[in-house]
Amino acid sequence: MSEREILTHSSDDALAAAVAGRLVAHLAAAQAAGRRPDVGLTGGTVAAKIHEAVVTASEGHDDVDWSRVGFWWGDERYVPADDAERNARQARQTMLDRLDVDPRRVHEMPASDGPHASIEEAAQAYADEVRAHGEGDFEVLMLGVGPDGHVASLFPGSSQLDARDAIAVAVTDSPKPPPERITLTYEALNRSREVWLVVSGEGKADAVAKALADGTDRHDIPAAGVQGTERTVWFLDEGSASRLSP
């Protein structure tokens, strides 16, 4: 049975520092236990703060061998590789280029200016890459949550919510621009040992409260449908936690 934690922090900076410290400690423990951890990354303002905090938490310490950590993404905008909206570009600038990572273990989702003839082909290529290079699950998967309750690029009412026997699928009509994206499916997301949902801002408080309520349908609030095999942790600031019962 997956455990659930709900942790509220005074600000998004405090949230980012807490996530970063826990990630470094978790990866160090996983490597000490003989595992080669894979991490699923997300994008957005809070993610950038977390990445910066990871670099700070790692300075002067060798607890984690970053060259033995694999990096993946839960979703990505299907835009050119150098587009500022790419989650991977943000992660490289704020964290990956500043740590001693092995480039062979950084697995970006395909870009629209890549070799694939269609977004569907690109999504299948990423699924094949997960099968070929992944360790079978993510040690930690970080996800943001939108005001509508979406996670990765799984949006309320979308057909991708019911994808079966698929690791990654194409999204061509995202209600949040850009419309074309690639996303991991629930079947892939829910193979993670630990899922960490990182949420900041009062504008997401309703989505958080609904996702954490008993009986919420994931078709209405997709965040309700994702959980780790061992633990699910909600990292919130005071604004995003403001609609939760005391």
Image (cartoon, rainbow, N blue to C red):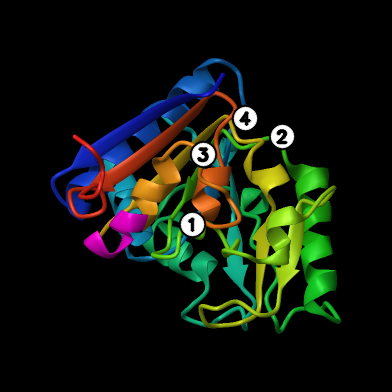
- On the image, the x and y values in percent for residue 87 come to 50, 67
Name the N-terminal-most of marks 1 and 4: 4
Instruction: Provide the secondary structure element on which disc 4 rests.
Output: loop
Q: Amino acid at mark 1?
A: Thr
Q: Nearer the viewer, mark 2 or mark 1?
A: 1
Answer left or right for 168 relative to 7.
Answer: right
Instruction: Provide the secondary structure element on which disc 1 rests.
Output: loop
Q: Amino acid at mark 4?
A: Arg
Residue under label 2, please give it: 135
Q: Residues within 10 Å of mark 2 (few under 14, many from 20)?
A: some
Give yes or no for contact between labels 4 and 2 (Cβ–Cβ under 8 Å).
yes
Q: Amino acid at mark 3?
A: Gly
Q: How many marks?
A: 4
Answer left or right for 1 relative to 12.
Answer: right
Residue under label 4, please give it: 36
- On the image, the x and y values in percent for residue 185 come to 69, 52
* Real-space CA distance between mark 3 and mark 1, rounded to the nearest whole angstrom: 26 Å
Vertical placement of residue 61 versus 3, above or below: below
* Real-space CA distance between mark 1 and mark 4, rounded to the nearest whole angstrom: 20 Å
The image quarter in which residue 178 lies: bottom right
